Each structure stands twice: as structure tokens, then as C-alpha cells.
Image (cartoon, rainbow, N blue to C red):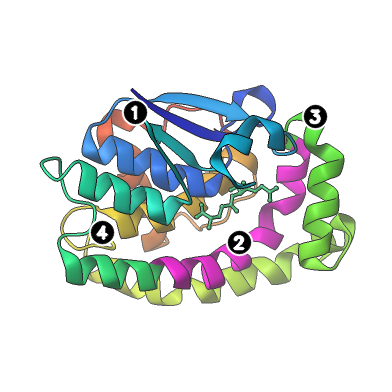
Amino acid sequence: MITLYELKGAGGRLYSLFSWRTRMALAHKGLPFESHPVPMSDKAAIAFSGGKTVPILRDGDTVVRDSWRIAEHLESAYPQAPSLFGGSIGQGLCQTFNIWADRTLVPAMLPVIVTDIHQRVDPADREYFRTMIEGILKTKLEDTLAGRDKAAERLGRTLDPLRAALKRQLFVCGESPAYADYIVFSVFQWARVMSPFNVLAEDDPVAAWRERMLALHSGFARNVPVA
Ligand SMILES: N[C@@H](CCC(=O)N[C@@H](CS)C(=O)NCC(=O)O)C(=O)O
């Protein structure tokens, strides 16, 4: 039995962006799992993992924390199921891409949607979330909201290379999706679950790709509570 510890938002929203990478990886491998959502401030609930963040995967007797390490675990523990990386070169390249996404794409999306996230976290997490995020962004949430249009423009520029790639191929990984697609998708699913703000224009090739991602694995990511 596989259990995924992730974040519990208001109204059953599952908003941990890193956990979406794991969710999609599990669906890709065809592995059933049980979701165990916890409030962000409840560190006692995840103390067994030795850390303070989700996702955490419990796979039989094995506990793995950190979305990248979980992807590596799934790839090596379930080699017969569809591959997440397509071999060792793909795995190395994908790790580089994972770091790029975490340091470039995630910070570009955060100021665009953060005030909406704050309104939709578990009510018990409101103050915890505000303090944490204002510390990271070094601004009050209200000031971040005032700068949203500029942040959305910055996000648009950050997406440029991705947009160019998705004009040439259907998925980040080429003809069919794999883990690098799930890395990027997690950022858009985070936005979709927590924010009504339109982060992509309808005619954007990235929007068409997002639709393809939502259709995967029998609409696995489409059919969840959203903003
Ligand atoms: N590098 C980690 C990042 C995990 C992470 O930051 N998770 C967030 C939720 S998406 C979290 O648990 N934050 C809790 C906190 O900062 O208190 C991964 O890829 O799993």
C-alpha cells in the first residue's frame, strides 16, 4: 500500500505543488495510492518523516521525502511500469530541469497567485501561511497583490522558452509526457486549484499543453476541487 502525505486546503483542495509532481508520477506508473492531506502547520503529523515538508511517500516499510527523491524511488522500485525519465541521461537532465523549475518558474508564479492561496488554505493555517510567505517574499500580502500585473508579465516572460518548445512538440518530453511535464504541470495545477486568476491566455501554446495534461490518466488532475 502506498500513502501520499500532502497539503490540506479549504474545501478539500489539494494544493501542494510538489505533491502534484508525485501524484502525476504515481498515475503515470499506474500505482494506486491513498492520499493523506495534512494542514501545513501540523508538523507533528509528518514528524515520522524526519522533515517538515510534503510530499512524503510511504511505500510499504519505506518512507521517502522530497518530490525528486520520490520520483527516483518510484523509477527504481517500479522499473516495469512506464518510465518517468527514459534512462540515466534523461534522469540527469530531468534533475537539472527540476532545479531550474524550482528556482525560476515557481518564484515567477508565486507572487501572481499567493494572495488567492492565502484565502484557500486550511483555516487553521492562515496565520502560519501569511508569516511564512511574507518572510519569503519580504512584502506584505497586500503589497504583493498590488504588484500582481507586473508579476504576471514577468511570469509570461519566464514561460517564453517553454512556449517555443511547445510550438514544436506536444509535450515537454517530446511525443508523450513524462516527469519533466509533471514538474511544469505542478506549477499550473497549483495555480488552478488555488487561484481564479487567468495565468495563461487562451491562445498560448502552454494553455493547449495544460489541456493535454489535464486529459491524461483519465482526467486524473482535472477532476479535483479547484478555485
Ligand atoms: N524540495 C521539496 C520542497 C517541498 C516543499 O517545500 N513543500 C511545501 C508544500 S508544496 C511544504 O511542505 N511546505 C511546508 C512549510 O514550509 O512549512 C520537494 O520537492 O518535495
User: Helix, strand or loop at disc 4?
Assistant: loop
Which residue is the site of mark 1? 60
Q: Nearer the viewer, residue 205 or 224?
A: 224
Q: Are marks 2 and 1 in contact (CB under 8 Å)?
A: no
Q: CA distance from mark 2 to mark 1?
A: 35 Å
For badge 1, the amino acid type reads Gly
Asked if residue 212 is among those painted magenta in the image, a careful observer would answer no
Q: CA distance from mark 3 to mark 4?
A: 37 Å
Q: Earlier in the sequence, mark 1 or mark 3?
A: 1
For badge 4, the amino acid type reads Phe
Q: Earlier in the sequence, mark 2 or mark 4?
A: 2
Relative side of 58 to 108, left or right: left
Q: Main secondary structure of the magenta part?
A: helix
User: Quarter of the image containing the C terminus?
Assistant: top right
Which residue is the site of mark 4? 171
Residue 86 vs 62, above or below: the answer is below
How many residues crowd mark 2 within 10 Å: few (<14), some (14–19), many (20+)?
Answer: many
Q: CA distance from mark 1 to mark 3?
A: 32 Å
Residue 29 vs 45, above or below: the answer is below
Q: CA distance from mark 2 to mark 4?
A: 20 Å
User: Helix, strand or loop at disc 3?
Assistant: helix
Q: Are marks 2 and 4 in contact (CB under 8 Å)?
A: no
Q: Nearer the viewer, residue 118 or 162?
A: 118
Q: Position of residue 3 (x, y in %)?
A: 43, 28
User: Quarter of the image containing the N terminus?
Assistant: top left
Which residue is the site of mark 2? 109
For badge 3, the amino acid type reads Pro
Residue drawn at x 22%, y 32% is 30
Which mark, residue 123? Answer: 3
Residue 215 vs 156, above or below: the answer is above
